[in-house]
Amino acid sequence: MSTKEKKNTSNSKNSQLKVPAPKAPTRIKIISIGAGGCGKSCLIKRFCEERFVSKYIATIGVDYGVKPVNVDGVDVRVNFWDLSGHGEFFEVRNEFYKDAQGILLVYDVSDRQSFEDCDGWLTEASKYGTEPTTTPCILCANKTDKKRVVEKEEGAQYAASRGMQYFETSAATGEQVETMFSDLFSRVLVSVNNRS
Ligand SMILES: Nc1nc2c(ncn2[C@@H]2O[C@H](COP(=O)(O)OP(=O)(O)OP(=O)(O)O)[C@@H](O)[C@H]2O)c(=O)[nH]1
Ligand SMILES: [Mg+2]
């Protein structure tokens, strides 16, 4: 081989080293669960689009959305699977629990029944493919702008008893929404990295 040929070979090796394949962003799957009307879709809309819709448009079965975010310096594509809270859509939503990497369990602080339903949601998640005891899970007490009937202590105690993080939010005002989602995504990334 001539000197010239040798040089070319070495250059092409170098250039291969210099151009690493683009790194695909990490994808995470988040599901939102909780009683119908507690504000799951509005929380996601507030986070993704920074707006609030006061008209109630119930989710029919499931809504899907994707949002690119940066979590602790890592590019992440968050896949939201926003499940309906109504019993009539049980057959549709139970298909979507599988492989969720983070859970947002929401109740409405102005509606005690929605708080009492939380155990049922955790059981459903566990039965259909996402184990809340081993998956990062946030308990979100939403609608703090309204007159509350479920006190903060009750919610926080319940979350602690089930190993969940607790946040109080208002999708209407935006209070704590960003902080809550950031916390959830960070926990999911840590858990995904620990598993790989
Ligand atoms: N005041 C107030 N209203 C809210 C808040 N979050 C949601 N709402 C209202 O509550 C109603 C239900 O909100 P959604 O986000 O559609 O509830 P959901 O949990 O997705 O309901 P399903 O899809 O039926 O399970 C709507 O009228 C919202 O405008 C909040 O933080 N404060
Ligand atoms: Mg909804």
Image (cartoon, helix red, strand yellow):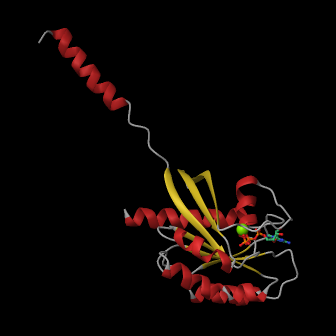
Residue 164: name its quadrant. bottom right
Residue toward you, 154 or 171: 171
Specify the quadrant that holds the C terminus. Answer: bottom left
Q: Is residue 172 above or below residue 154?
A: above
Residue 123 lies left or right of residue 14; in this view the side is right
Residue toward you, 116 or 156: 116
- Which quarter holds ligand 2? bottom right
Q: Is residue 157 above or below residue 99?
A: below
Instruction: Please provide percent x and percent y for residue 61.
Output: 65, 68
Q: From this viewpoint, is residue 163 visible?
A: no
Residue 108: name its quadrant. bottom right
Q: Residue at x 75, y 71 (%)?
A: 39
Residue toward you, 92 or 96: 92
Specify the quadrant that holds the N terminus. Answer: top left
Residue 105: name its quadrant. bottom right
Instruction: Please provide percent x and percent y for residue 174.
Output: 79, 63
Q: Residue at x 71, y 86 (%)?
A: 115
Residue 135 lies left or right of residue 117; in this view the side is left
Which residue reaches farthest left?
A: 1
Instruction: Please provide percent x and percent y for residue 101.
Output: 50, 67
Q: From this viewpoint, is residue 179 visible?
A: yes
Instruction: Please provide percent x and percent y for residue 36.
Output: 73, 76
Residue 175 lies left or right of residue 104; in this view the side is right
Residue toward you, 176 or 95: 95
